[in-house]
Image (cartoon, rainbow, N blue to C red):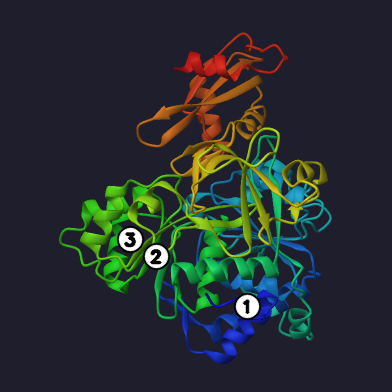
Amino acid sequence: MEPVPDWGTIPRMLRDRTARHPGDVVIVDGGTTLTLRALREEAARVARGLIALGVEPGDRVAVWAPNSAAWVVIAYGVWDAGAIVTPLSTRFRGIEAAALLRRTGARVLFVDEGFLGFSYVGALEEICGGPVGGRPYGDLPELRHVVTLPGTGAPPPVLAYEDLLAGGERVTGAEDRALAVGPDDLGEIMATSGTTGRPKGVMLHHAQLLRGYWDWASIVTLRAGDRYPIIAPFSHGFGINAGLLACVLKRATMMPISVFAPDALLDLIERERVSVLAGPPTLFHRILEEVDGRDVSSLRVAICGAAAVPPELIRRLIERVGLDRMINAYGLMEGTVVSMTRAEDPVEVIAATTGRPVPGVTVRVVDDDGKDLPAGERGEILVGGYGVMRGYWDDPVRTAEAVDAEGWLHTGDVGALDARGNLAIVDRKKDMFIVGGFNAYPAEIEALLLHHPAVAQAAVVAVPDGTLGEVGWAFVVPSAPVEPAEIVAWARAHMANYKVPRHVTLVDSLPANANGKVDKRALRARAR
């Protein structure tokens, strides 16, 4: 496999790619088509606009918007300005967004105002108050500017995207700023929820992002001319890095998907001759259900990141769709790309494992005492190598809990290695559960529920759900008269939908174990 070229930083990579292949189309988004030359030019305009606003190298610039060509341009503009891309999930509501903005000290926030009828600006104003001293929100002292995406608008002090660009027209020295970015400089702070109940920011630097996703794209065989819809949100590590970044690395054409609809995706595959597709097993099941009468012969690579993929699904995709390969993989925000299956792997390996570690990454499976376990035995997965995060932003305590003194990332995931080094994921982090493909953390949901004026205590456990896989069940000790349906309705208004408990039970008190902690086992039994 060809090693990553010696770019060092994302701005230098973009310049090299543009100099060599200026006319290659890397973005198609509805009626918007951008070549490498156009992407570089538009990103430079964004960088100049940010510099005009006073953004300095190392500042955090947040983006709260769905996938779009504008999102891509903004990200590369932020990197050109020497700043750090800090994405926010479009599923966030005001409380969640404010918490991450406050934690990272973001200086600028880009928003797609009014996406799906939701006002990002209004949601933050409700939680953080209105303008104070020229700042957009009183309770976000470090946030200096809010900028709307092209085609959307909001009253002052929010700045229109077009005005941002106009403000940077007279800026000089922007190219020097881009070339001054170093390989060890931070490129991203990615939000990850955790068992502490508050968002954490995973710090990733330019060199590790380039190496990790060059290798990922090489194993996948992503190449110039590929047509690749990006379904995963750019706010997620896969969407931004295995999509937005990888496509420019390999000169493939990305097609940002803002709202996923299976029928629309099949139309896109036929119309645009899509060749690469990534998603959970449910996505590929749906394609097989609808494949009759559809021309999906352009598909050659499918990428699935799941602990287990039904073998029959892989066989049917290869036989009925004509795929060249299907790739399974394991990664996590704190460790980027960890392991991947390879083209030569048999169906049984792709179905039951996430493959072997990628070059430069080491995987260990250890017991409770930290001793390495032999092949076939289950233990905690530890990850070492270049892909391990720098740490959690402004959180040395939790960084030390996650990454030990020798540099090993303790994932909290349980797995086993086979004799060939293939990694099988056999269990998930202790309390996390997955709702329709999204990771949900009970402690975070509990902390959000405590914002309700009638909730004194809350404990959340996962229960099976026939549609979404798992959903949350909240046990609530009320501080005032309230009905369960009222709490669910409030949660829908204030949380990302996958975090919303589908069931609420009011209780006089929460059961405790011998250590005085909430007895989740007892609550799960009661929920069942």
Rendering coords of residue 170 (x, y %)? 75, 85
- Residue 43, label in figure: 1
Residue under pointer 2: 343
Element class at badge 1? helix
What whole-number distance in Å separates the C-alpha atoms at marks 3 and 1? Answer: 28 Å
Q: Secondary structure at mark 2?
A: loop
Label annotation for residue 265:
3
CA gap, disc 2 to disc 1?
Answer: 35 Å
Image side of residue 83 versus residue 252, left or right: right
Sequence-wise first label, 3 or 1: 1
Q: Nearer the viewer, residue 485 or 510?
A: 510
Residue 317's x, y, as percent?
A: 27, 58
Measured in 3D between alpha carbons, the distance from the residue under mark 2 to the one under mark 3, in whole angstroms, is: 25 Å
Amino acid on which the number 2 mark rests in the picture: Ala
Q: In the figure, is residue 273 to the left or right of 4?
A: left
Q: For the residue labelled by badge 3, is the local secondary structure a helix, a strand or a loop? A: helix
| Residue drawn at point x = 62 percent, y = 74 percent | 162
| Tag 3: amino acid | Leu
Whether residue 329 is situated above or below residue 522 in the rendered picture:
below
Q: Which residue appears farthest toward the left when viewing the image? A: 293
For label 3, the crowd category at 10 Å Cα-Cα, with few meaning under 14, some 14 to 19 and many 20 or more, is some
Q: Nearer the viewer, mark 2 or mark 3?
A: 2
In this rendered view, identify the residue nearer to me: 447 or 407.
Answer: 407
Question: Badge 2, how many Cα within 10 Å: few under 14, some, many 20+?
Answer: some
Lower sequence index among marks 2 and 3: 3
